[in-house]
Amino acid sequence: MARLPGLPVPAVVRQSHGLQRFMLLLGFGLMAVFLVVAVLAPWIAPYDFDAVRDSDGVKFGTQQAPSAAHWLGTTVGGQDVLSRVVFGARTAVEVIVLAVVLSSLVGVPLGLVSGYLGGWLDRVLVLVMDALYSFPSLLLAIVVSIVLTGGQSSAFGGIFAAAVSITVVFVPQYFRVVRNATLAVKSEPYLDAARVVGVRTPRILRRHVFSNVSQSLPVIATLNASEAILTLAGLGFLGFGIEPSAAAEWGYDLNKALPDAASGIWWTGTFPGIAIVLIVLGVTLVGESLNDIWNPLLRTRGGTDGHDAEEVADLVAVDPTEVAPVEATAPAATEPSGERLAVLSLRDLSVSFRTDGAPVNAVRGIGFDVQPGEVVAVVGESGSGKSVSSRAILGLLPDTATVDGSAVLRTPGDEPRELIGRRSDAMRSIRGDEVSMVFQEPSTALTPVRTIGWQLVECLRAHRDVSVAEAKERAVELLELVGLPDPAERVGHYPHQLSGGQKQRVVIAMAIACEPDVIIADEPTTALDVTVQAAILELLLSLRDRLGTAIVLITHNMGVVADVADRVVVMYRGSIVEQAPVDQLFAAPAHPYTQALLDAVPHLGRETGPGDAPPSEVVLDVDRLVVDFAGGFGRPTFRAVDDVSLQVRKGEVLALVGESGSGKSTIGRAAVGLQQPTSGSITVAGHQVSGISDARLRPLRRRFGFVFQDPAASLNPRLSVGDCVAEPLRTQTDLASAEVQARVRRLLEDVQLTGEHASRFPHELSGGQRQRVSLARALALDPDLLIADEPTSALDVSVQARVLEVFRELQERLQFACLFISHDLAVVDSLANRVAVLQHGRLVEVGPRESVLGSPTQDYTRRLIAAVPVPDPVEQRRRRAERGALLTEES
Amino acid sequence: MNPLARYLLVRLALIVPMMWFLVTLVFVLMRVIGDPIQAAQGGRLSPAQIAERKAEAGLDRPLLTQYLEYLGGILRGDFGTTLTDNREVSDILVQNGAATLELSVYALIVAFAVGVPLGRLAARHRDRFPDVVLRLGAILVYAAPVFFVGLLLKLAFTPFGWPSSGRADTSTELALSRGDHETHIMLLDAILWGSPDMVLDVLQHAVLPAVALGLLTGGVFLRLVRVNLLQTLRADFVTAARARGVSERRVVRKHAFRTALVPVVTVMGMQIAMLLAGAILTETTFEWKGIGYELSEYLIARDFLAVQGIVTLIALIVGITSFLIDVVVAIVDPRVRF
């Protein structure tokens, strides 16, 4: 839409499109009309609202039909309907504005404080507000209105009384919305980041919580305003609104018009009714449209996930898309190529997405073949188009996608079939039967409200003509085949009753249920722990051997590729840059991107990390730490950390490794006072930090910094990068503004960014840059201790390399003590002095890096190390043979 | 302990303080205005007469004593006595509660019949013609106060002689009240009486109020179902089901819809309160003699003892219904159950 000259078009209108925009503008228009009418009522209305005679003293007469003198007729009380409707708008607007202002003034602060502080205050407030909310709002308004007007027919501040009655009803709604939004924001890492540096509660509420919560307020305010009008009208209708002699009110008029309806007098009630409908319609349209536009759950996704093109270009030294792709044909050792027909052949496959902006080309003309029984790995970093192309094959992309090119499926006994452009019902018989999929996140790939048996039976019966009983029997067999313990019992379980690894086994069971010719596995082990990953990969390989299924394995993990792939396809920004047999690819990568990628992958056992640090003073001392999390009512408490003692010295990096649920993050949070220990003590540079009040902890906070896992979430999206980095300085020092600026600039340069980045907002940076900002913020106060909680696990390999390099360099220079929390043993191997291994909250083993990772003494550590696939197919085959039975029965 | 039982126990335990708070709030608010006898009879009776009446009703005792007595009464199911016609408030529940229940059930039937399938339709055709029409319709229905819809229905149907007030013709009502099996649920009474004419008469009277109230709630249901289904249709497990070759129809019905229903049922539970508020207005509009109708009569008569009793009663009904809704949610969603 063209920008109207002279009229500021709000940003939200520009964000909307099509119908949405029409509804939004219609809503704004209706609201504007009623506002104008309300303000100008005395000039617009032909008569006063309760006038019964004109200026000549002649009575209007009652229930007169519409005429030239009275366009909308007269009421049973003998007043002009039009005038009453016009003045009614004034009453409605006054009451709404007053009610919305009053209820947000009370409800918003209450919700903020209650949600942020939690505890008893929160529980009591929630109970009270829930009670008020569950109560019929009109009844509550009636009761309050009786109280305010004393039940007498006095004209006591009619409008104010009505507004207050409505306010009482709406405070709980503001409270709920703001409290929920506060709770959501509260769990964001950027709030933890602010707390770590000791930002005080009022400032946190103002700077971090309110600024992010406030965007939901226009929606709730408009939705409430419409309810306010309806409640006001309801009060008036029941005779508990504004005193009829004090102001015109539509609800009251409707009540008076009710008996008229039976006698066919339509004008007395219809017009005030229409006025109510229109004003509520206007307000609701605005609220609904805002919600539709702003609700992230309903937004059409577009674009690629923040790909760090800039950083990759740095790494590769040339733009990989400029270099011609490399294709190595399989050496004709085992079988002459071309003799066996590929079961799946992609040619010139392209996918583009329509977005609100320019179309995004996610896949640009790729082609590769998959032979029967072959494992083809498609590797690439985020945004390379690897998942999109796999979904395009099965026609699973949303309507916004356009797919071109060809994907031919050749199965024994059938004609070759083209999959692209196939009608969806013709596609249905192929999906799950001849080509099936395994998804990344097993917990979201299963329907939560159906048992796994039900889902398996459905899958079987979708393709095979079998009875439910037969299908059930087969389901149990399948679950047994994928190694789920107690299949006969588990078949009746719901997904949430299984662990992540077990769920992935169920997903695989469904994928093989109809013995497909091709399985597309999209990052099937990324969400799983490494020991579980090893077991799942083992399972996929054994199924391939048994059923001869071809597997297209989509992954970003070069270790997994080296472990299981026969052939590798490397993708970068929607194109294939190289394809080669696995040994050749790792031994002699031909394309510069592949070379850079392989160089960037840390390799467990081959890293030359630092040795033991020279002895120096202890900075972090964790002594017999226990952290319990209370279970819900009647549930046992959960012990996250169980009697852990460890020390980190100045200039030393201690890596804390373990699988999910091992308690490693909890220890990190306890070390900086984000989590109170149940027992045990924590000292930082000789100062006790556990079990002391926030006020006493605040001055100590300058001694530690914290880097969080997800750089996208740990920087407040509404603060500039400079403000994010400056926050610790502003909180903990009295530096003048200019000094803060200068220091921020220096810090950004330390992490290889420029001062120019200070004025940007986090979303304008790449993931790797954001994580370096996070590091700059953590180091702003020159801390004695740095806690890094999985600082690189949300990043792509090529970006991770750069962040780790910056980190190593700064650590060497500044000599801070560092607790480095990670699940990635290869990363740990490249930078830790010492390693501590955790399992189920207990410390399994701790010691110098070489001895823990090189010659572990504990069984669990050995299993953990054996499960890590290394990015070298030759070495990985040896490791696989060696580990033998070490990894059986896990997940 | 069985996890479901434990969950329900927790939920039950939470209702008690909530109800206590509401009951206390109503008591405190209704006493802030002074004493109800003064409010109802002030000006009509001499101060001496009022004092006498107050002593009779026990209103001259300390507030705390009255409060405790009031709480005790509620525990015994005694919600006090009306001032104007000396009726036990609990009798109002028995005699008029059935009418409100009957109207609510009809309205819920209409709301479900309209809201759920149309919400599903709108979601499946997002941003296309049916969706646009249905959404605008839902907003219009929401924007129209129930008494205005009632008025329009009356205007449209009275000319054809369609009954638009009361629960049945006077003759039917009289006949039924003399029956042996008076359940106060008129449709049931008419069926038990065995007269098809009466059944028809009762049903005819129910149509307009049920439609007025049901449309209001149905519009809300429609929007709820639409938005939740849209969100669920984007879930990974829906794609996963499609990837297994499950037909589109089945994906929507068996995978998405059931999951989308969980938040819908929760919010529908909250709508029960709205339905009751709507019932007050609907009953007044159609002279449907339920609790809401009685409440508005007592309000007009300024009989605040009756109002206090009825409001307390409604608070209890709301509390109990929201508990029942949670039971339903627990049944629909296995994640709550275990």
Image (cartoon, coloured by chain):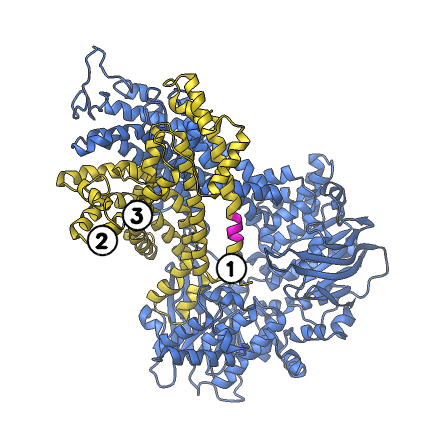
Question: Separation of disc 3 and disc 2 at Cα?
Answer: 14 Å
User: In terms of secondary structure, where does tag 1 sit?
Assistant: helix
User: Depth check: A91 or A764 in front?
Assistant: A91
> Tag 1: residue type?
Ala
Residue A285 visible to the viewer: no
Which residue was labeled with disc 2?
Answer: B191
Placement of B249 over or under A111, stated as above or below? below
Placement of A469 over or under A365, stated as above or below? below
3 and 2 marks on the same chain: yes
- The 10 Å Cα crowd at callout 1, few under 14, some 14 to 19, many 20 or more, is few
> Tag 2: residue type?
Ile
- Residue at (44% x, 30% y) in the render: A144
- The 10 Å Cα crowd at callout 2, few under 14, some 14 to 19, many 20 or more, is some
- Residue at (40% x, 70% y) in the render: A394
Residue B144: give its label. Answer: none
Q: Chain of mark 2?
A: B
3 and 1 marks on the same chain: yes
Q: What residue span does the magenta drawing correspond to?
A: B10-14
Nearest to viewer (mark 2 / mark 1): 2
Question: Separation of disc 2 and disc 1 at Cα?
Answer: 38 Å
Which residue was labeled with disc 1?
Answer: B5
